[in-house]
Image (cartoon, helix red, strand yellow):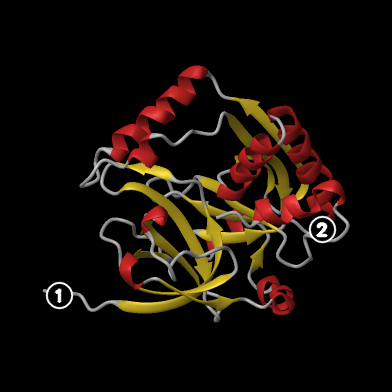
Amino acid sequence: MSISPKSSRVTILVKALPQPSKQYGETVCCAGVTREGHWKRLYPIRFRHLQDGQIFKRWNWVKFDYREPTRDKREESCHAYEETISVDGVFPERERSLFFNRIIVGSAEHAAAKGQSLALVRPRNTKFSFKAKSKDEIAKSKEAFQQAAQQESFFDQKLADLDPSPYEFRFNFEDDSGQHSYQDGDWETHAMFFNERNRSSEQEALRWMNEVFNERYPKQGMVFALGNMAKRPQTWQLLALQLPFLQVSESMGNHDSEIVDARGVD
């Protein structure tokens, strides 16, 4: 029996780190919000397989067709038909504050009580930190991507050569439910590290990120996008962080353009 696809249009808020997948090779967890304020989780998205006109960034409006997933029972989850994805404009910056303040909740627990598996939370007393991964951790991540690359119909050399991040980035913070410590799974955070390391040095990249996340962003209304896990719904993760309601480029010092560029790297 055929299943008639449904259609949706969302503005993208979440693009998490690429993950190796035995079935799809490499996937990216993406999520957005409809004009009516409803979350949609797009999966599986093989981002590097998208064509011109399909490659989207945060704050793009994206149209896509989907069906309900077979195993993922979270209300917001959509099995997106990758070939139907199209970019349909950008959410105007001047409208973001009013619109997205309506969907911010006090904590992940508050979202779960409403039946949600995705949420925007404004954290308090945030502390960004980083920790070098062990050689074994990096090697295991590398091996996972190499194995995923071989699942494709053709060997994906770019995927096999993907360098895992050598650091774990983490945020400690408070919300209305208490204190938390979440690993940062935002693609753009790790892009910031690699971009600045390539431009200058690893030490400078870490120094700069420490300044941005511990001094500048907390003063500018930083917001976390959180999501839970399909198999362990009680476990929530930090999927994305952003400054949705303020200009990022205001008087940010010597790294003004790099901050804008790094936060926009998708």
Is residue 234 found left or right of 208 in the rendered image?
left
The amino acid sitting under disc 2 is: Gln
- Residue at position x 38%, y 57% in the image: 45
Residues 206 and 214: in front is: 206
Q: In which quarter of the image is residue 130?
A: top right
Tell me: residue 163, above or below residue 255. above
Instruction: Please state the horizontal and vertical placement of residue 42, each as a whole percent of the image.
Output: 41, 63
Instruction: Please state the horizontal and vertical placement of residue 249, each as a whole percent of the image.
Output: 80, 60
Is residue 13 found left or right of 141 in the rendered image?
right
- The reply to whether residue 58 is in sight is yes
| SS at badge 2 | helix
Instruction: Please state the horizontal and vertical placement of residue 235, each as a whole percent of the image.
Output: 50, 45
Is residue 12 found left or right of 260 in the rendered image?
left
The amino acid sitting under disc 1 is: Ser
- Residue at position x 71%, y 54% in the image: 176
Q: Of the residues under marks 1 and 2, which one precedes in the sequence?
A: 1
- The reply to whether residue 81 is in sight is no
Q: Mark 1 points at which residue?
A: 2
Residue found farthest to the top: 135
Which numbered marker is on residue 250? Answer: none
Residues 186 and 40: in front is: 186
- Residue at position x 34%, y 73% in the image: 84
| SS at badge 1 | loop
Q: Residues within 10 Å of mark 1 (few under 14, many from 20)?
A: few
Report the quarter where the C terminus lies. Answer: bottom right
